[in-house]
């Protein structure tokens, strides 16, 4: 899977290179002046045609924005903000509140003819304003490890890298049976949570799990929900939790295919391998055709997935976070 380039260093105007500031806070529109004025406002349904005209060839296969536009613009949990120059939409970003106190930014796009003008910077600042008004204390987004310009731009905006993740996938479910993995029961909640509290992997992942392309804080009640919905696999020997795997099938609905996503996985080599064997067998029995997995970048995790024949994405994903304050 490929992901959008969230920001480009070239998107920051020269006069904001050394110190980004909010411009005209009392104004409803975010404005930067660099030749022509950039006005940032909420997207309207009638913006669709103009926006999709520059969201067609982001990657070799195209772009996902045309598929999600109608859903995003109606989503009560978020907003699409557009950058306008001369009355024309030239950039967008979507911001959503993924849970109380947490905002997620995604889908940043700029018209090719309007890059290097601060469009995405202006839109991002407006997204952060929205997040603060909705009570968000943190804003996060993801970018690829090879996208150095985006990383520099994010740091200029006050974002900090907090965790690295790797995407894996497989359609090969031939494997040996698992020995000690099973779906967790609600009685396991406390023990599994205590395991997480002491987990190096959990700290390395900054306490996050992935759902589709979004990383969210994993809290005890979230874990409860995974267990209650039969989406938490545990590795347990003699009453001791050795690892856990959280799964979800939203990818199947999103991409209209029979697939499952590993949202979080934790444990030593043997435990992770055993849980993945259990998951492969489960998918084969349920006629699931594909597993997508998100793991930490820990060397042990990499060795397990490679050992079991998962295909690795070429680049890592870096999650960035910004602590928000009232404007």
Image (cartoon, rainbow, N blue to C red):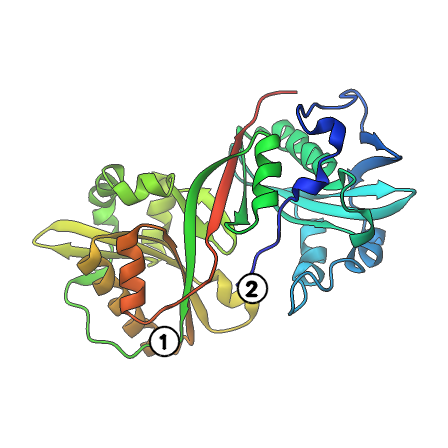
> In the image shown, does 152 or 7 lie closer to the viewer?
152
Quarter of the figure with residue 308: bottom left
Residue 182 visible at all = yes
Q: Which mark is residue 254?
A: 2
Q: Say if mark 1 contacts mark 2, CB within 8 Å.
A: no
Position of residue 178 relative to residue 200, above or below, is below
Q: Position of residue 151 (x, y in %)?
A: 56, 41
Point out the tag, 1 or 2, that comes first from the N-terminus: 2
Residue at the far left: name it.
Answer: 238
Q: Position of residue 221 (x, y in %)?
A: 36, 41
Q: Position of residue 84 (x, y in %)?
A: 84, 42
- At x 71%, y 50%, the residue is 109
Judging by the rendered image, the residue that carries numbered circle 1 is 286
Q: Disc 1 or disc 2, which is closer to the eye? A: 2
Q: CA distance from mark 1 to mark 2?
A: 18 Å
Residue at the far right: name it.
Answer: 86
């Amino acid at each position: 899977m490929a992901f959008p380039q969230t920001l480009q260093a070239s998107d920051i105007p020269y006069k904001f290179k050394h110190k980004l500031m909010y411009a005209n806070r009392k104004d409803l529109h975010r404005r930067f002046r660099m030749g022509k004025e950039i006005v940032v406002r909420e997207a309207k349904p009638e913006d669709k045609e103009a926006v999709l005209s520059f969201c067609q060839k982001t990657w070799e296969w195209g772009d996902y924005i045309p598929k999600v536009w109608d859903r995003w613009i109606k989503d009560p949990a978020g907003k699409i903000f557009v950058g306008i120059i001369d009355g024309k939409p030239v950039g967008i970003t979507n911001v959503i509140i993924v849970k109380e106190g947490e905002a997620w930014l995604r889908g940043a796009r700029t018209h090719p003819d309007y890059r290097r003008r601060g469009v995405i910077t202006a839109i991002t600042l407006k997204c952060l304003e929205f997040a603060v008004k909705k009570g968000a204390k943190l804003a996060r987004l993801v970018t690829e490890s090879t996208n150095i310009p985006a990383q520099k731009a994010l740091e200029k905006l006050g974002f900090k890298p907090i965790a690295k993740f790797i995407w894996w996938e497989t359609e090969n479910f031939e494997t040996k049976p698992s020995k000690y993995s099973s779906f967790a029961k609600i009685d396991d909640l406390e023990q599994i949570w205590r395991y997480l509290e002491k987990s190096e992997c959990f700290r390395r992942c900054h306490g996050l799990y992935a759902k589709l392309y979004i990383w969210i804080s994993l809290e005890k009640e979230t874990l409860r929900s995974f267990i209650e919905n039969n989406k938490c696999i545990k590795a347990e020997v003699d009453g001791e939790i050795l690892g856990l795997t959280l799964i979800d099938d939203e990818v199947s609905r999103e991409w209209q295919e029979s697939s499952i996503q590993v949202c979080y996985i934790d444990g030593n080599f043997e435990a992770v391998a055993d849980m993945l064997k259990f998951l492969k067998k489960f998918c084969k029995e349920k006629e699931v055709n594909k597993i997508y997995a998100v793991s930490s970048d820990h060397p042990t995790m990499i060795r397990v997935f490679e050992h079991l024949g998962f295909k690795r994405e070429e680049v890592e994903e870096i999650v960035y976070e910004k602590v928000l304050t009232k404007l």
